[in-house]
Image (cartoon, rainbow, N blue to C red):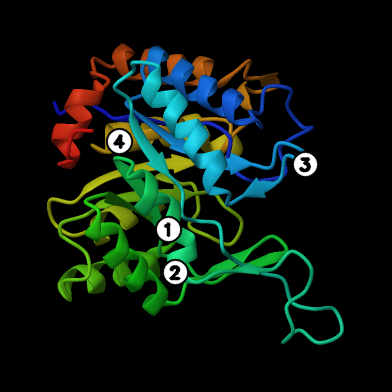
């Protein structure tokens, strides 16, 4: 059995600050959460940064640099995965929906990946979705995705292709077939987000069947779907993800004390079924990630 990669998404950029006391906000907190997750058994840590003053999402290169340097200086070999998902939010204006309303953040492809080009992590996310999420539209034009992919590829970083519904997989396959992305690809299937793919076994199996042959893939569920979908992904041969970006609870009614506790639960579930959590070195080999 191939070892199972555990990713930990330690903070995200959502409105969870104030809803949970352990949401990391400052760069030192985010780095410490990532290091703790790595020591608990995560092979990959997925990083967003937040404005230290407000707790809201940020695209600051300086904040990313501090987090990345702290993780690298810690001595852990964990793979660093930086988000590029910020910069595609559109809120329709109240009076004229064609005019961007407050909260809109649409950026050029270069602006969305400049921290990746500068810091050269092992992996970065590349969202393939255009969809409606709660009160905002997420807009990722295929031409922007292609430009981001080419920039990411130019510095040797592996893109994690985040797919939220079946059409996203078809787009990913088209980009691979056209040579924009290297195949067979590393796909992350997102389940249970409002207006995206449902968090069910049947949906996960369907999404998996759409992937390119031999693609490396993982899946995760949002909120209460987190651990059920972790087990479904593991049982179907995929990798897994946990963390306070996706879910605040360790079990029903019990807030997770921190990201490390969520990783430890994932380790326990996998090993209880005779699975083997991947080490960072094994994850690098599975994903074909360059070292350092």
Quarter containing the C terminus: top left
Q: Is residue 276 left or right of residue 250?
A: left
Quarter containing the N terminus: top left
Q: Provide residue 150's location: percent of width, then percent of height.
A: 27, 67
Look at the image and tell me whether residue 57 can be seen. Answer: yes
Q: How far apart are marks 1 and 4 (CA)?
A: 25 Å
Q: How crowded is mark 2: few (under 14 residues within 10 Å), some or many (20 or more)?
A: many
Earlier in the chain: of badge 1 and badge 3, it is 3
Q: Is residue 237 left or right of residue 6?
A: left
Q: Residue at x 43, y 66 (%)?
A: 110
Q: Provide residue 100's location: percent of width, then percent of height.
A: 73, 78
> Which element carries disc 1, helix, strand or loop?
helix
Q: Do the residues labelled 3 and 4 touch (CB within 8 Å)?
A: no
Where is mark 4, residue-wise?
Answer: 239
Q: Distance between the residues labelled 2 and 3?
A: 25 Å
| Of residues 206 and 176, the one drawn nearer to the viewer in this rendering | 176
Where is mark 2, residue-wise?
Answer: 109
Q: Provide residue 149's location: percent of width, then percent of height.
A: 31, 64
Q: Are marks 2 and 4 in contact (CB under 8 Å)?
A: no
Q: Residue at x 15, y 59 (%)?
A: 183
| Of residues 203 and 36, the one drawn nearer to the viewer in this rendering | 36
User: Residue 54: which numbered mark, if any?
Assistant: 3
Where is mark 1, residue-wise?
Answer: 113
Q: Residues within 10 Å of mark 3 (few under 14, many from 20)?
A: few
Earlier in the chain: of badge 3 and badge 4, it is 3
Task: Using the rendered view, name the quadrant where residue 94 is placed.
Answer: bottom right
Q: Are marks 1 and 2 in contact (CB under 8 Å)?
A: yes
Q: Distance between the residues labelled 3 and 4?
A: 33 Å
Q: How far apart are marks 1 and 2 (CA)?
A: 7 Å
């Amino acid at each position: 059995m191939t070892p199972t990669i555990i990713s930990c998404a330690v903070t995200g950029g959502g409105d969870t600050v104030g809803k949970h006391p352990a949401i990391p906000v400052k760069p030192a907190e985010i780095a410490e959460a990532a290091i703790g997750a790595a020591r608990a058994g995560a092979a990959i840590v997925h990083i967003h940064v937040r404005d230290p003053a407000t707790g809201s999402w940020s695209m600051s290169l300086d904040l990313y640099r501090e987090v990345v340097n702290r993780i690298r200086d810690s001595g852990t070999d964990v793979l660093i995965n930086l988000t590029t998902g910020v910069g595609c939010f559109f809120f329709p204006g109240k009076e004229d929906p064609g005019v961007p309303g407050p909260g809109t953040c649409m950026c050029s492809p270069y602006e969305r990946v400049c921290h990746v080009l500068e810091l050269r992590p092992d992996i970065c996310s590349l969202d393939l979705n255009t969809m409606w999420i709660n009160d905002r539209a997420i807009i990722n034009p295929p031409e922007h995705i292609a430009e981001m992919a080419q920039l990411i590829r130019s510095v040797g970083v592996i893109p994690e292709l985040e797919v939220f519904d079946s059409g996203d997989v078809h787009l990913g396959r088209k980009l691979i077939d056209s040579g924009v992305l290297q195949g067979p690809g590393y796909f992350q299937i997102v389940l249970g987000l409002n207006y995206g793919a449902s968090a069910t076994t049947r949906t996960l199996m369907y999404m998996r069947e759409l992937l390119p042959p031999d693609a490396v893939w993982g899946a995760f569920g949002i909120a209460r779907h987190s651990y059920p979908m972790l087990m479904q992904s593991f049982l179907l041969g995929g990798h897994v993800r946990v963390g306070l970006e996706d879910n605040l609870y360790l079990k029903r009614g019990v807030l997770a004390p921190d990201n490390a506790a969520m990783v430890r639960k994932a380790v326990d579930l996998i090993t209880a079924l005779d699975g083997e959590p991947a080490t960072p070195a094994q994850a690098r080999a599975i994903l074909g990630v360059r070292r350092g």
